[in-house]
Amino acid sequence: MKYKKINHEANEQNDDLTVSRHRFIQASAALISIPFVSTRQAIAEEKTSQGSLPIHVIDAGETKVVPTCSTFDCGGRCDIRAHVREGVVTRITTRPDHELDEAMPIMQACIRGRGYRKFVYHPDRLKYPMKRVGKRGEGKFERISWDEATTIIVDKLKNITEKYGPACRYVSVNTAVIGGVSSGDKMLRRLLNITGGHLQFYHSVSMGNTAAATPYTYGVATSGSTLDTLEDTPLVILWGHNPAETIFGHSNHYFQKMKKNGTKFIVVDPRYSDSASSLADQWIPLLPTTDNALMDAMMYVIVSENLHDKEFINLYTIGFDEDNMPDGVPANESLVAYLTGAKDGIVKTAEWAEKITKVPANIIRQLAREYASTKPAALMQGWGPQRHICGERVARGSTILATITGNVGKKGGWAAGFGGIAGNKSLYGLDVGKNPVKEKISVMNWVQAADDASKVTPADGLVGADKLNTNIRILFSLAGNYLANQNPDINQAVKILADESKIEFIVSSDLYLTPSARYADILLPETSFMERWNIGFPWGTGSYFILSSKLIEPEFERRSDYEWIREVAAKLGVEQEFSQGRDEKAWIAHIMESNRQAMPKENLPTFEELQRTSKHLFKIPPYVAFEENIRDPENHPFPTPSGKIEIFSKRLYDMQHPEIPALSHYVPAFEGPEDKLTKKYPLQLITWKGKSRTNSTQYSNPWLKEVQTQKLWINPLDAQKRKIKQGDLVRVFNDRGVSMIPAEVTQRIIPGVVAMPTGAWWQPDKNGVDWGGCVNVLTSSRKTPLAHGNSHQTLLVEVNKA
Ligand SMILES: Nc1nc2c(c(=O)[nH]1)N[C@H]1C(S)=C(S)[C@@H](COP(=O)(O)OP(=O)(O)OC[C@H]3O[C@@H](n4cnc5c(=O)[nH]c(N)nc54)[C@H](O)[C@@H]3O)O[C@H]1N2
Ligand SMILES: Nc1nc2c(c(=O)[nH]1)N[C@H]1C(S)=C(S)[C@@H](COP(=O)(O)OP(=O)(O)OC[C@H]3O[C@@H](n4cnc5c(=O)[nH]c(N)nc54)[C@H](O)[C@@H]3O)O[C@H]1N2
Ligand code: SF4
Ligand SMILES: [Mo]
């Protein structure tokens, strides 16, 4: 069996998974099995808290404390200790302090991890397979048997595929299970590939704009290092990066360590985020989408004050000044020419940027001087600023700042982007086989491809063909809430979803009846990660993998996606080819074994060993992105056309696209602060990833709902103008939709901008007004110019008191 290696974050949508790093140091010991001291207490708590769940008979017996992890898409991969007794998880703890070890990241669970039990043992969890009985989207279902469910799926697969061909089959975004080496969605794609293929999408909704832009600077999409290389860094700029809430696990460990070591933190964010409050020495708020103006002015200050790293620029870059340009480009296109206004007459001074960004000019100068004169310094750009219509330019801009200050390839510096780890070896995931369907669409085009595929052209990002021959007719959504909730412009998407003459058949699997699952024709109750085996791994900056142990048997008629997909394969007559005789656990063992064979020198553990060890974590050595290219440029040129870091990109220049210029300079954004639409909708709205859920996963968890209630942050100045007081219900609206949500009047957000956490469930009334505080009734499906990617963060709204 052949395995393909990919980078994890960039490939939510791709056919295989990978652990983002490699040199695993083997370690072993016995599974921890300690007597549980307060069993009675736990049982008592369990009996009262399980609500309508069947009562488990729990009598005297040993409680086992089993290490495991979830496979959600939070970026962390924490070390969970599940207390299991008589087949029930009675308590969740995390890696105990006495096991902490300097060499390993802590990976103690965040609040979501500590609340996992309430996600798994929730009375609202789906229990049986169901089929739709009402209108699509109405949410009316009736219980059916698994046999009926798989028979319907087989019939629809056969009949609809016969009519339109395999390119009519589409598997939607499914991030809730991408933190493991295998998942139901990958198994489904394996089956679809065996039976003719399916229409695939590309573009990571998380960081696809960064992934598309970064190759124009460094030649590769990934530019991150491991966080353990930053322990002695004197300065970290968290640029739209909020690691105190996101990517919590290992990153929290390293950021706390840096803080202790005296690292200075500056946070550039329109919001006073939890990272600003817990780490920062300085918070620099700015208007969303204006990051490039701030970056341009920083570059101007650096260059005009002679603070740039001349030696580094000479040795490793192209496009800095007029003497250092690629052939065939007219005069005045270099960075210095742009900054000094040689072509457009505008000098990119701090005063110029102040007007655009609202950051005072003296603060811009201080930030620029501090970044350029502190050696090394790490400017870490998060993904919030690149999930904007200008996201590709922001991603390029931060790489150019890192370049002109000589922070690329240096320990303690940072190449600025954050898209996984460049040049790493990886653990290979499930082989889904080859997809015979060649055409691929951007994830932003699925609604259009379901509505009228003839309108999806190469100009819209169609690749592999000149046109699509068929609309999407069969839609699978396994472990995603992306049909409605997380997809931009929900109202536009659900019109197509509800129309049975468009998509003829929708299958959804989830743990809950989510706003997306309401559109299913067949709704399947999947097991949770606690009811399956897997191997989990954190995102790129982390450096280990970890066993995700099966803890409990599924209740009611819940089944893992693999099991029903295997049944479908049997009814289609391809069971042997599909399953190769393996059950789910055997697949995980097989994937581990294949990795051992592919990487004999790494001394990886067997799956059996992983289950027997308490040291089920594998630390790998620190990694600095582009270290080799900088140390030995002769033998390791950058994989760009010039072999250098490209400040000016000839490839972008040749595109002559005004929104993605050859340099990363500021261009006013659609629905940004300079758009004339601000007359009608004067406030910019952004979202952030809150601590109480991972996107919409765990939305129903009652403990987590108490931690962070869904509210709209609004500055007192904007609130006063609208007579909005603390806690008032407000109406947030634009031409795309209306959402009702309580107001949090707070100086934690810059005037002119409002914000809400992403992932609250969409709750439309009969007039289409959302009462759930779900931002995606307001967001736009406009695509970014280079990646054909998402711009979830760029939108204008007005807010009224309800
Ligand atoms: N707790 C938690 N953790 C998560 C997730 C979650 O839902 N909850 N989701 C996971 C997933 S799927 C992903 S992709 C990652 C996402 O990680 P990120 O994309 O980095 O997270 P966000 O919170 O969307 O954005 C980070 C910060 O960018 C700021 N921001 C927004 N617009 C701008 C702008 O124009 N300029 C600047 N400078 N800053 C801006 C936001 O206020 C926010 O504080 O997190 C992962 N981790
Ligand atoms: N406005 C706005 N929109 C955004 C974002 C934003 O920042 N702002 N972020 C975007 C990003 S980066 C992302 S990654 C997407 C995320 O969007 P999605 O990929 O849709 O992720 P979730 O919302 O977490 O939905 C996952 C679903 O899977 C279910 N689930 C959990 N575990 C399992 C399991 O084991 N099996 C099955 N079958 N189901 C399971 C959960 O209950 C949940 O309903 O949202 C995007 N949308
Ligand atoms: S950071 Fe992620 S893996 Fe860690 S406990 Fe929280 S949700 Fe789970
Ligand atoms: Mo994401």
Image: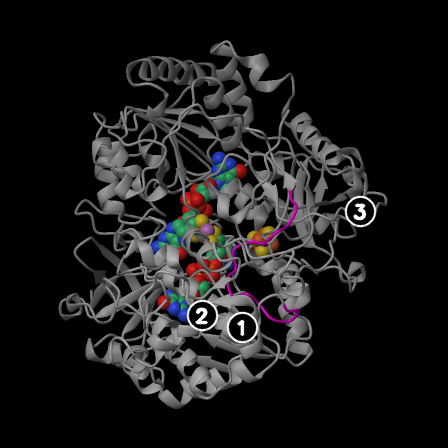
Residue bearing mark 3:
614
- Furthest residue toward right: 29
Q: Left or right: where does residue 44 sit relative to residue 333?
A: right
| Tag 2 near tag 1, CB within 8 Å | yes
State the image coordinates of residue 483 (x, y, percent, origin top left). 34, 40
Seen in the picture, residue 404 relative to 619 is either above or below; the reply is below
Position of the C terminus, as image quadrant, is bottom left
Residue numbers of the magenta segment: 410-426
Position of the N terminus, as image quadrant, is top right
* Residue type at tag 2: Asn
Q: Earlier in the sequence, mark 3 or mark 2?
A: 2
Q: Separation of disc 3 and disc 2 at Cα?
A: 56 Å
State the image coordinates of residue 192 (x, y, percent, origin top left). 45, 22
Q: Residue at left 25%, top 47%?
A: 764
Residue bearing mark 1:
314
Q: Earlier in the sequence, mark 1 or mark 3?
A: 1
State the image coordinates of residue 798 (x, y, percent, origin top left). 20, 66
Say if the magenta span includes residue 373. Answer: no
Q: Nearer the viewer, mark 3 or mark 2?
A: 2
